[in-house]
Image (tube, rainbow, N blue to C red):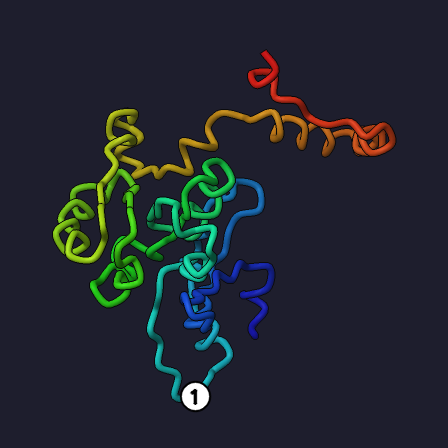
Amino acid sequence: ASDVYKRQTVFWQIDVSGNVRAGKIMGYDAKTGHRVKQPFNQVSWVHSVRKIPDFHMRQCLFGEHLLAYASSMARTVAIVESEKTALVAALFIPDFVWLATGGMHGCFNSEAMQVLKEREVILFPDLKATDEWRQRLPMLETICRRVTCSDLLEKMATDEQRRQGLDIADFLLMEDTPQMILARMIQRNPALQTFIDTFGLELVDAEKTE
């Protein structure tokens, strides 16, 4: 592959049957964690880069393979727009199964959504896409057992945040967690990790010990 794709992220779309449908390649800034869009938008597909002949892409939801696990059956499915957002949200809110459409439109269609049949689903659209995602509710209501479109971000957001079209991951990452603070401390002083390992220290959540 071209050098331009080195050190970029591949988000594999694996369906509920374990079939790899596609590999989406995107570039991220290592310092900010934001997408690289200058001097050009770094988005491509594995089949294009590898020049796979006669490839017919049928996208599925990013993370769809998680629906095959028995442990997911009783859990609510949360749908966001970007793959990165699904991964971040899964770390903060593991009670949901987090999936991504891969864009405002992406695979947000009746065929791809059939995998959500009889599931409870919550949509978490980016601020810029709330109205459009609400228009998809009638389609999903014919498939899902129950589906709602969260207005949490709309209630929290400032006018500037709406202009930026922030998503739920942006809000989750705004406040540092104890784990994030510790990781920065270790980065500044690697000897701290050795100290932690030597004495078997664990990070304690103060709120849970009260």
Where is residue 178 drawn, in percent x and y? Answer: 61, 25
In this view, the residue in front, 78 or 128, is: 78
Q: Secondary structure at mark 1?
A: loop
Residue at numbered disc 1: 53
Q: Reply above or below: 81 against 160.
A: below
Q: Reply above or below: 98 against 195.
A: below
In this view, the residue in front, 7 or 144, is: 144
Q: Quadrant of residue 152?
A: top left
Q: Residue at x 43, y 65 (%)?
A: 13
Q: Quadrant of residue 16?
A: bottom left
Q: Residue at x 38, y 52 (%)?
A: 99
Q: Reply above or below: 127 against 99.
A: above
Q: Residue at x 22, y 41 (%)?
A: 148
Furthest residue toward right:
198
Q: Is residue 50 visible?
A: yes
Where is residue 102 drawn, in percent x and y? Answer: 35, 57
Q: Quadrant of residue 7?
A: bottom right
Q: Residue at x 53, y 58 (%)?
A: 9
For the C terminus, the quadrant is top right
Where is residue 67 drawn, in percent x and y? Answer: 41, 57
Q: Reply above or below: 44 against 124.
A: below
Q: Is residue 152 left or right of residue 88?
A: left
Mark 1 nearby-residue class (10 Å; few <14, some 14–19, many ≥20): few
For the N terminus, the quadrant is bottom right
Q: Is residue 68 left or right of residue 120?
A: right
Q: Is residue 195 left or right of residue 18?
A: right
Where is residue 141 drawn, in percent x and y? Answer: 16, 52
Q: Is residue 40 visible?
A: no
